[in-house]
Amino acid sequence: MGSQPALPPLSTPTQTDLLQELRVEGLVYHYPGSDNGIADISFSLQRGSLTVITGRVGVGKTTLIRTLLGLLPKQSGKIIWNGLEIAEPATFLVPPQAAYTPQIPQLFSTSLRENLLLGLADDVSPEQLNQAITTAVFEQDLALMPRGLDTQVGTRGVRLSGGQKQRVAAARMLVRQPELLVFDDLSSALDLETEQKLWRRLFSTGHQRHSAVYTPTCLVVSHRPSVIEQADTIILLEAGRIVFSGTPAQFNQEMMGRNIVF
């Protein structure tokens, strides 16, 4: 018998595809030997939007974003970029497509400059670096450091405050200008004024990527009202499942109806 013709490969997104829509369908992950995890998670992110995942401690918020990014292996479901399924999230959702800052940012025992440019080529301009630092509301802190970007941060960033470490981690993400920014409680160590500045700057116009305007899409884990009120969409998790998705106004009504306080 003659051999059958090979099937054409399935279309997959490429590392040059600018994000227009990210869709998650039926995402499932449970920790081994446990019922804890997430189940039947479905939502979509539109280009340039801010989506906040919120809920009580232990409901699966961090598990959701780690599964989305391929840091935990999904057991079911699809992750779809501009209509095309991502086969390997762990290798696709990395810069320049996505960048992630966990609850406790990882810094290295080296200079601020090296922490910010970690793994990047030498072609990052001073303007690009300064823009990332300013957007992350770190420029005033940097100005007070006698050695500037050559300041040594110490083991795991011990010489920086919690808020400074979070903003350095944000600047490290921003200098890469990924399509998707994923923050796990980024602003938990920031005061209200600094936090509001960061979000305003992040979504202001004028961020340049080469010859085009940089339009970030953000997925954020947070329970802080100052973040939630700026969201386009809020996703509420309970016991690993989405129980609500809507606007801040709709969310406030939902919270009153459920009598939930974080």
Image (cartoon, helix red, strand yellow):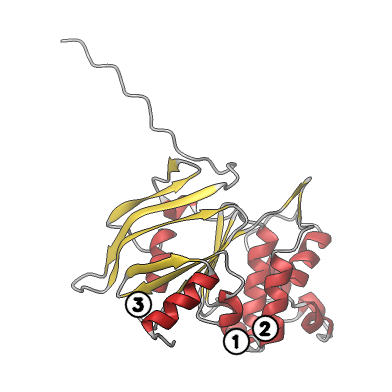
Please say if the residues under marks 3 and 1 sit with CB atoms less than 8 Å apart. Answer: no
Tell me the SS state at disc 1. helix
Tell me the SS state at disc 2. helix
The answer to whether residue 56 is visible is yes
Q: Quadrant of the N terminus?
A: top left
Tell me the SS state at disc 3. loop
The answer to whether residue 101 is visible is no
The disc placed on residue 189 is 1
Q: Residues within 10 Å of mark 3 (few under 14, many from 20)?
A: many
Three-letter code for the amino acid on which mark 3 is drawn: Val
Please name the residue shown 20% across and 10% down the image.
Answer: 2
Three-letter code for the amino acid on which mark 1 is drawn: Ala
Please name the residue shown 70% across and 66% down the image.
Answer: 202
| In the depicted structure, whether residue 191 falls above or below residue 4 | below
Left or right position of 17 against 135 = left
Comparing marks 2 and 3, which lies closer to the viewer? 3
- Quarter location, residue 216: bottom right
**Which mark is first along the chain, 2 or 1?**
2
The disc placed on residue 139 is none
- Quarter location, residue 37: bottom left
Residue corresponding to mark 2: 164
Left or right position of 102 against 155 = left
Residue corresponding to mark 3: 59
Three-letter code for the amino acid on which mark 2 is drawn: Gln
Q: Residues within 10 Å of mark 1 (few under 14, many from 20)?
A: some
Marks 1 and 2, Cα distance to the nearest angstrom?
9 Å
Please name the residue shown 81% across and 82% down the image.
Answer: 140
Marks 2 and 3, Cα distance to the nearest angstrom?
28 Å
- Quarter location, residue 129: bottom right
